[in-house]
């Protein structure tokens, strides 16, 4: 079966541009997470959805970051007016329910802001 | 807040050597503990997990035991292979907090 997919795999943006990153979770998975991984670091939590409800967005670093999952499946992470410090790998993960359930990760989108 | 500390790398070993990667945590309540692995050019994969104290997770020859008394979840393997070269991440999640909290990762290189 298909795993978690993300697109694009690589994105180069000029400072100030808006970007949109897409995540297709495993079919039937209720929970969806976004993480940000800077070079040489562990992932950092950004936001969490249960179906279409965004239950936790405490990790979003600024109001330039926005995430949605309108139909409880595909999710989009949008970054407005990108800055150089936004350069990182953005990881999406899904799990069947949540809690201690295993999270399955996509390959990530590597964003470089010039 | 909750946190994970794991030993810094890089770790370089010869094939068939014994591996230990230390991981300790700070958490309220009773977290679940995980080891994820990231092979070169690939995404994060769950290696093993343990959901309560004294549980032992194991997979592909790797083991880790959930030690509540020492708040540790050290990763071990008796005989590493070149194919084990990767970055290993310790993480936790617990209670109503569904997010994973991660260590910084430990890079392992195994030489033939």
Image (cartoon, rainbow, N blue to C red):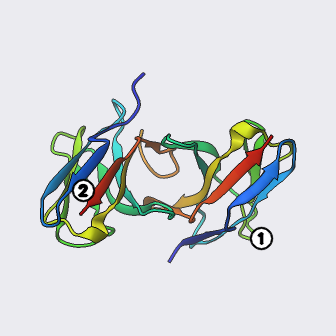
Q: Residue at x 30, y 55 (%)?
A: A111
Residue B53 lies, with reference to residue B2, above or below; the image says above
Name the image quarter holding the N terminus of chain A: top left
What secondary structure is found at the residue carrying circle 1?
loop
Q: From this viewpoint, which residue is outermost toward the bottom?
A: B1
User: Mark 2: few, some, or many residues within 10 Å (few <14, many ≥20)?
Assistant: some
> For the residues tagged 1 and 2, is the chain the same?
no
Judge whether residue A108 can be spotted in this image. yes
Quarter of the figure with residue B15 = top right
The residue at 25%/37% (across/down) is: A73
Q: Residue furthest top?
A: A1
The chain containing the residue under callout 1 comes to B
Q: Quadrant of residue A22?
A: top left
Q: Is residue A28 above or below residue A82?
A: above
Marker count (numbered): 2
Label at residue B2 = none
Left or right of A86: which side holds B95? right
Q: Is residue B34 visible?
A: no
**In front here: B103 or B86?**
B86
Percent across and percent down for residue B73 are: 71, 60
Spatial CA distance of label 1 from label 2 is: 35 Å
The disc placed on residue B69 is 1
Residue at disc 2, secondary structure:
strand
Where A62 falls versus A101 (above or below)? below
The image position of residue A35, as x and y in percent, is: 38, 57
Q: Percent x, y for residue B12?
A: 76, 55
In this picture, residue A50 sits left or right of residue A105: left
Q: Chain of mark 2?
A: A
Q: Residues within 10 Å of mark 1 (few under 14, many from 20)?
A: few
Name the residue tied to disc 2. A54
Horizontal placement of A105 versus B6: left or right?
left
Q: Position of residue A41 (x, y in %)?
A: 50, 64
């Amino acid at each position: 079966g298909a795993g978690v997919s993300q697109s694009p795999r690589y994105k180069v943006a000029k400072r100030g541009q808006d970007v949109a990153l897409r995540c297709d979770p495993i079919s039937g998975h209720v929970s969806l997470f976004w993480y940000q991984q800077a070079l040489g670091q562990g992932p950092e939590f950004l936001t969490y959805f249960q179906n279409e409800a965004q239950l936790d967005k405490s990790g979003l670093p600024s109001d330039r970051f926005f995430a949605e999952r309108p139909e409880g499946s595909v999710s989009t992470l949008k970054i407005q007016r990108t800055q150089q410090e936004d350069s990182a790998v953005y990881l999406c993960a899904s799990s069947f329910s949540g809690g201690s359930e295993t999270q399955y990760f996509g390959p990530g989108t590597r964003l470089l802001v010039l | 807040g909750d946190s994970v500390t794991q030993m810094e790398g890089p770790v370089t070993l010869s094939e068939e050597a014994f591996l230990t990667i230390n991981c300790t945590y700070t958490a309220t309540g009773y977290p679940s503990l995980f080891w994820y692995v990231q092979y070169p050019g690939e995404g994060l994969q769950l290696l093993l997990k343990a959901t309560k104290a004294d549980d032992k997770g194991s997979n592909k020859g790797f083991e880790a035991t959930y030690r509540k008394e020492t708040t540790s979840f050290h990763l071990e393997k008796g005989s590493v292979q070149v194919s084990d070269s990767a970055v290993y991440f310790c993480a936790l999640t617990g209670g109503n907090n569904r997010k994973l909290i991660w260590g910084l990762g430990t890079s392992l290189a195994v030489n033939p």
